[in-house]
Image (tube, rainbow, N blue to C red):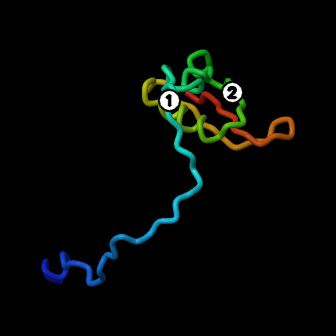
Amino acid sequence: MSAHTLFKKPSHKIQKDIPINEPAISIESDIPVPTGRGKENWTSYPFAKMKVNDSFWVEDKKLLTSHTAKYKKLNPGKDFTCRTREYKGTSGLRCWRIK
């Protein structure tokens, strides 16, 4: 295959000025920007206080996994693992300190 074949322009034309169906989102003015980054951050979780084999459970799966990764990156000597579990009839994540 030649370099000319690899970098060939696509044969289809891009249509411009296509009408877009905008969602019903209202635009608001004069809403102050919060001073903090929000209530939930990785320091909201007890990573620093945990000993090996300690664990905790939370409902918010998405935040915990990203915050665990950030804490591990900032603290390379510590390691954690999180697993989806049910606790008292509610699905969530349990996080263990393993190192």
Q: Residue furthest top?
A: 49
Q: Position of residue 27 (x, y in %)?
A: 52, 43
Of 48 and 14, the residue lying toward us? 14
Of 85 and 30, the residue lying toward us? 30
Q: Position of residue 15 (x, y in %)?
A: 34, 76
Query: What residue did someone put label 2 on?
Result: 55
Dividing the picture into quadrants, the one containing residue 50 is top right
Of 26 and 87, the residue lying toward us? 26
State the residue at coordinates (86%, 40%). Answer: 89
Q: Residue furthest right?
A: 89
Classify 37 as above or below 4: above
State the residue at coordinates (57%, 50%). Answer: 25
Q: Is residue 72 left or right of residue 8?
A: right
Q: Is residue 97 left or right of residue 27?
A: right
Quarter in which the N terminus is drawn: bottom left
Label whose residue precedes the other's in the sequence (1 or 2): 1
Could you say whether the residue bearing mark 2 is in a helix, strand or loop? strand
Dividing the picture into quadrants, the one containing residue 62 is top right
Q: Amino acid at mark 2?
A: Ser
Classify 3 as above or below 80: below
Q: Position of residue 11 (x, y in %)?
A: 26, 84
Classify 22 as above or below 33: below
